[in-house]
Image (cartoon, helix red, strand yellow):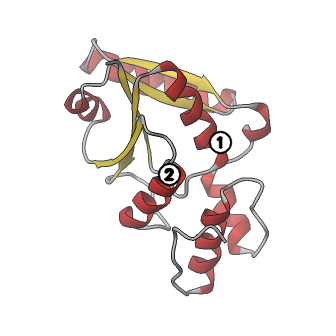
């Protein structure tokens, strides 16, 4: 069984992330979404909340599992038995950083490939950061994230807790 991991912070998961994931599931028998526990970012959502949002997003994808990891991505890929790391590219500006990561990962684990997937053009400008910014200003973000993610974002910015699994 050929498996891959799709690492990221997913804070929050976007339609762009899901686009990459859907296409990765067509290339591999199994894909593990690997949520980074240690990152240089300050997430809005807790690890548990991100797990819950991603679990909801992938509930109808039998060949996808969601997991949290710490440390080097390639070490987690090895632990999962993955042959590849999936990375999404939105624009040329993403490439330089991703290329450097891929070369470092290849040096550390020459047996694990990095696969770059370009997002569909309709998602090329979407980033978790811009979605969070828009939601913080109470702008609708339903074109960029699933409905339950939009609800969770508005809940975060209004200060109340909501059931993240609810579709409405």
- For the image, the number of numbered tags is 2
Q: 145 or 112: nearer the eye?
A: 145
Judging from the image, what secondary structure is the residue with disc 1 in?
helix
CA neighbours of label 2 inside 10 A, class few (<14), some (14 to 19), many (20+): many
Residue 143 appears in view: yes
Quarter the C terminus occupies: bottom right
Q: Which mark is residue 156?
A: none
Q: Do the residues under discs 2 and 1 have CB atoms within 8 angstroms?
A: no
Q: Residue at x 51, y 76 (%)?
A: 163
- Choose top left, top right, bottom left or bottom right for residue 28: top left
Q: Residue at x 78, y 32 (%)?
A: 121
Q: Residue at x 73, y 37 (%)?
A: 124
Eyeballing the image, is 80 above or below 145? above
How far apart are labels 2 and 1 at the CA level? Answer: 11 Å
Dot 2 or dot 1, earlier in sequence: 2
Left or right of 64, for residue 124 = right
Q: Residue 85's spot in the image, x, y percent?
A: 40, 26
Eyeballing the image, is 142 above or below 97? below
Judging from the image, what secondary structure is the residue with disc 2 in?
loop
The residue carrying mark 2 is 10
- Choose top left, top right, bottom left or bottom right for residue 158: bottom right
Left or right of 155, for residue 85 = left
Eyeballing the image, is 143 above or below 7? below
Q: Residue furthest top?
A: 110
The residue carrying mark 1 is 16
Residue 97 appears in view: no
Q: Residue 44's spot in the image, x, y percent?
A: 50, 68
Q: Residue 143's spot in the image, x, y percent?
A: 78, 54
């Amino acid at each position: 069984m050929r498996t891959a991991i799709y690492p990221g912070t997913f804070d929050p998961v976007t339609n762009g992330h899901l686009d990459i994931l859907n296409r990765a599931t067509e290339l591999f028998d199994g894909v593990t979404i690997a949520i980074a526990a240690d990152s240089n970012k300050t997430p809005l959502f807790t690890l548990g909340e991100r797990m819950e949002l991603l679990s909801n997003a992938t509930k109808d994808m039998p060949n996808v599992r969601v997991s949290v990891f710490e440390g080097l991505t390639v070490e987690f890929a090895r632990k999962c038995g993955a042959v590849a790391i999936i990375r999404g590219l939105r624009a040329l500006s993403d490439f330089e950083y991703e290329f450097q990561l891929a070369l470092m990962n290849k040096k550390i684990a020459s047996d694990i490939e990095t696969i770059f997937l370009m997002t569909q053009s309709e998602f090329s400008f979407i980033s978790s950061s811009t979605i969070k910014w828009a939601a913080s200003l109470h702008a609708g973000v339903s074109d960029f994230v699933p409905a339950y993610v939009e609800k969770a974002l508005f809940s975060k910015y209004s200060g109340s807790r909501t059931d993240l699994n609810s579709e409405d």
